[in-house]
Amino acid sequence: MQPDNQRIDYGAAAATETRNRVLRNTYALLGISLVVSAVMAYVSMSFGLPHPGLLITLGVYFGLLFAIHKFQDADFAILLVFALTGFLGYTIGPIVGYYLAVNPNVVVNAFTMTAVTFIGLSAFVIMTKKDFNFLGGFLFAGILAAFVAGLIAYFFNMPGLAMAVSYAFVMLMVGLILFETSRIVNGGETNYVLATVTLFVSIYNLFSSLMHIFGMADE
């Protein structure tokens, strides 16, 4: 028989390997998803395709999100991820095109800050392995409240509230990146498809919110 401490070492090594595999797969899929999204944004921007509108965007977004969660372990789940990230890229293309025409610095600054923020937060969590699981409840409530406030600002044309929602989403997405990366690093998230979607949505919302903030400040 093997000593108990040796069996424990094997178990710890297996858990570490699982976490490392999820982390590798997540960032590999995230990288490809960002490329897919960027290509679709370029296509929609280059051909002047119209934004589908808020209601269609939300319907397709939540529909694909539901499908990804339902079929998260299926072989075609990755195709659903590409469908979601490609669609979100298409929706942000006209917005990026607008800001590039008005003031390219808005897009450059938003992109730079998004990249620095994501890389910095991810590196911090991976190196320290700090547990941010305690943020879960706060993030759920905060995102729900900000989402509802965003709908109110949109339908009632309230630019001040829209700006406040953008600032709130910046802070919430920072928290979500910390939370999800922490779950991956500490073994709380074992499905790299779901982890990829969460991180992608965080990056997307962070980038779009920063564009809105910089764009309003430039007016």
Image (tube, rainbow, N blue to C red):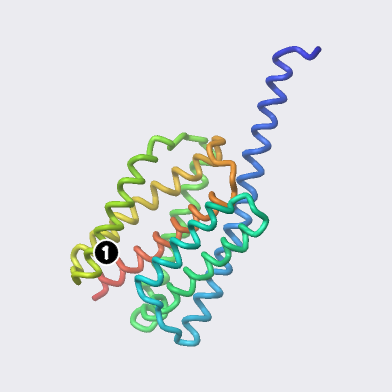
Q: Nearer the viewer, residue 79 or 163?
A: 79
Residue drawn 48% across and 56% down? 66
Q: Position of residue 28 (x, y in %)?
A: 63, 55
Q: Nearer the viewer, residue 108 or 138?
A: 138
**In the image, is residue 6 above or below residue 190?**
above
Q: Quadrant of residue 34?
A: bottom right
Residue drawn 45% across and 84% down? 49
Q: Secondary structure at mark 1?
A: helix
Residue drawn 47% across and 82% down? 45
Which residue reaches farthest right?
1
Quadrant containing the C terminus in the rendered view: bottom left
What's under tag 1, amino acid-wise?
Leu
Label 1: few (<14), some (14–19) or many (≥20) C-alpha neighbours in 10 Å: some
Q: Identify the residue under disc 1.
A: 151
**In the image, is residue 90 above or below residue 118?**
below
Q: Position of residue 200 (x, y in %)?
A: 50, 58
